[in-house]
Image (spheres, helix red, strand yellow):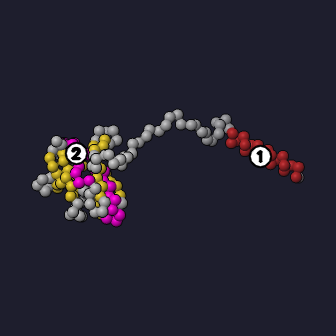
Amino acid sequence: MRRLLLPLALLLIALAAAACAGSAGPGWTYAPPTEAPAATPVPSGDASEAPGSEAPSDGAGGTVLQLSAFNVDWEQKELSAPADTAFTIHFNNKDASVPHDVVIKDAGGMEMFRGQLTTGPQEIDYQVPALAAGTYQFICSVHANMVGTLTVGG
């Protein structure tokens, strides 16, 4: 009986190996990448860049303004944006467990934009509709001391 088990076991192993090797080839293959993936630019945080400077967005030609809150104050007190064109404010709330938002008001105090309240540390993109040329105030509705100037157009 032992003599029969060994050839039978070898036959089963051979059948299993043949089934795995089938005519379709192995169940996996390795193909090295044909080209390197496209690099995505990352803001450098270089000190030579002006705070709140404009930077093109994902190639759509939009403008992205960088704004951050730290120690319950704006790190950028002045921003500029193009007139009559929607833009993005990339807001970085660096204050742990502190809520902030961005509200834009015209010279008469009328609210032109209100961003979602966000508790830090957290980053969020605000999509701001087109504004007419002029000077606006941006504030945090939670903290009266957080006031900055947004210049549109010019």
Q: Secondary structure at mark 1?
A: helix
Dot 1 or dot 2: first in sequence order is: 1
Q: Position of residue 134 (x, y in %)?
A: 14, 47
Q: Which residue is mark 2?
A: 81
Q: Which span is picked out in magenta?
A: 76-98
Identity of the residue drawn at 26% across and 53% down: 76
Quadrant where the C terminus sits is top left
Say whether residue 24 is left or right of residue 87: right
Say whether residue 30 is left or right of residue 89: right
Identity of the residue drawn at 86% across and 49% down: 4
Q: Secondary structure at mark 2?
A: strand
- Which residue is at the front of the view, 25 or 133? 133
The answer to if 119 sits in the magenta stretch is no
Q: Position of residue 138 (x, y in %)?
A: 21, 55
Give the amino acid at mark 2: Ala
Q: Is residue 119 visible?
A: no
Q: Quadrant of residue 139?
A: bottom left
- Which residue is at the front of the view, 119 or 74? 74
